[in-house]
Image: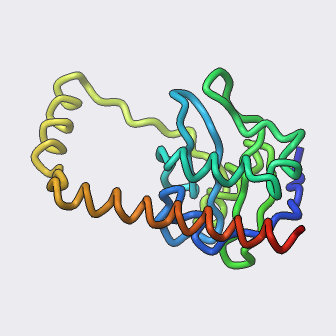
Amino acid sequence: MNTTYPLPVAVPPMLEASIGYTGKARLVAFFFDAGDEAYYSDGHITACGEWDAYELFINHPLVAPSLRGYDLGSSEAPPAYYLLLDRQARALSAAPVALAQRLLREQWGAAAQSDLALVVTEAEWEELVADLMVRVTYPSPAQIMESWQEHRRLVEQLAAWHAEQWEGAL
């Protein structure tokens, strides 16, 4: 399938930030997958997002009906579709996973997934991991608290935005 399916859903201005995406890509995808986790992907990075904001958004009465028929994944099965956000147009669509992944890669100029693989010995791998561990920085308790408070603020904004949309629809 080479078709994206535009969704008639208003996009909250803080949607991607509330789910945890802080990158600069025009296109970013959201989905649910293994470990009961929400994920985001921009073609360069795929990471766990904030499940509470994702669930709040996709289960809202103004959004959920538009998502029927699109399997965005679960803890039991991978997604068949990604929720694809065009951040410039502030528009959402559902896209089959393979198409969404291709579009995400292409926005960075990567037309096809490379078949190249890096092969390292066990000793080289351990050296790479040791080098990485030296470079890793850990957030302080204050930074963790600040991040958590910012996330809560974004989720509250998302909920308030949805409440305004809901009142306007009645």
Residue 166 percent coordinates (x, y) = 79, 65
Percent coordinates x, y for residue 99 in the rendering: 77, 49
Residue most extreme to the left = 134
Q: Along the line of sight, which residue is nearer the eye, 165 or 17? A: 165
Q: Is residue 109 visible?
A: no
The structure residue drawn at horizontal position 66% and vertical position 61%, both measured from the top left corner, is: 106
Q: Nearer the viewer, residue 100 or 49?
A: 49
Vertical placement of residue 155 versus 48, above or below:
below
Q: Inspect this view and state whether residue 166 appears.
A: yes
Q: Name, please, the residue furthest toward the bottom.
A: 88
Residue drawn at the location 74% of the way across and 77% of the way down = 89
Percent across and percent down for residue 69 are: 89, 39
Specify whether 45 is left or right of 168.
Answer: left
Above or below residue 42? Residue 125 is above
- Quarter where residue 68 is shown: top right
Relative depth, front residue between 154 and 170: 170
Image spot of residue 107 (x, y percent): 64, 66
Q: Quadrant of residue 85?
A: bottom right
Q: Nearer the viewer, residue 134 or 8?
A: 8
The reply, left or right, for residue 170 in relation to residue 154 is: right
